[in-house]
Amino acid sequence: MGRFHRIASEVGSAVKTGVVSGVKITIKLAKVILPVYIVMAFLKHTALMSAASRALSPVMSVFGLPGEAAAAIVLGNAVSLYSALAAVKALQMSPEQVTIAGLMIVISHNLPSEYVVLQKMGAPAAAVTAARFIASLVAGAVAGAVLR
Amino acid sequence: MFDAPLSQVGLEALRGSLSLALTILVIVTPIMVVQEWLKRLDAFSRMEKALRPALRRLKLSAEGSFALIVGFIFGLMYGAGPLMQVGEEGKVGRGEISRIGTFLGVCHAIVEDTLLFVSAGASWLWLVPGRILFAGVVTALVGDRLWRKRHPSEPKPPKNRQ
């Protein structure tokens, strides 16, 4: 009985701490996601976006992605994975395109803040950051060629 | 200015963004609960022990393996504490840190990142086995060289302990 109580109270405290940090993280992320999603959802229907999309479509077609997906890739690398996720969702791409963009974004994202962690752990941060960005382009081209 | 009725665009923006925030709450919260539970079970040092033979073949020390597992599962941000400890303690050689950093740079937070994009419609086959494969290839190609290129005069890293 004592053992059961100990486990139950440990599970309880894990659930409590976990739920509190889950909610905290979501609130923090929602502050990024809601504005990005809303701006992207409106931009998607503007002449500006279709012009930018047309201009970038030769580049993005290397990955089998529409031109406007460039916005998600740029947001992912410069800002955060979550802002890129918001952009991917708002652009309403096909499942194959979400896979390709998703692969590129999970490989290379949050570059400025993750650079700091890499540097603090003693890794050659600039070289690793360059390597992951290049890796995301190669992975995107491979996935694009396979899934097209 | 818009190529669709404004009310329709606005409604989609509101509905889509709120549902995405809800999705994230539903994904992140259980991950945080499991993570807290695993921490209490000391699961990461156990995992490191179980994987030790395989990781030793990759010339990784115990400290390095622990950092690799934490980063692989938690990510660079949530795992930043233990990862930066590796840098501060100085027990792990620079070449090894470079290889771990290269692998983790490409492949980290495997649970969270994958679930978020799978919930948006992506295929997990590309995001898990595919990503691990890319990380392995990049690490094998350049992991050991990245730090030496920048510090050609530094001595070779000390031999791993154990």
Image: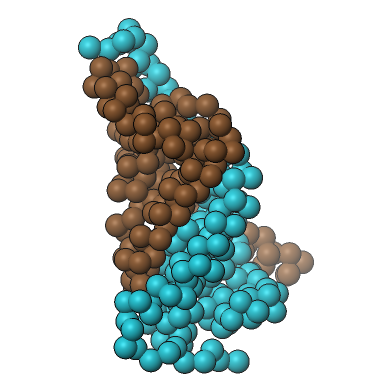
Chain colours: A brown, B cyan
Residue furthest right in the image:
A1
Relative to A116, does residue A122 appear above or below in the rendering? below
Can see residue A121? no
Q: Residue at x 40, y 18 (%)?
A: B12
Position of residue B9 measured from the top left corner of the image (x, y, whole percent): 35, 15
| B43 relative to B148 in the view: left or right | right
Q: Residue at x 35, y 52 (%)?
A: A110
Foreground residue among B21 and B40: B21
The total of numbered circles placed on residues is 0
Q: Residue at x 50, y 63 (%)?
A: B138
Foreground residue among B15 and B71: B71
Position of residue B90 measured from the top left corner of the image (x, y, whole percent): 41, 86
Can see residue B129? yes
Relative to A104, does residue B108 appear above or below in the rendering? below
- Which image quarter holds the C terminus of chain B? bottom right
* Quadrant of the image occupied by residue A3: bottom right
| A83 relative to B108 in the view: left or right | left
Relative to B111, does residue A47 appear above or below in the rendering? above
Q: Residue at x 47, y 71 (%)?
A: B143
Position of residue B35 measured from the top left corner of the image (x, y, whole percent): 56, 59
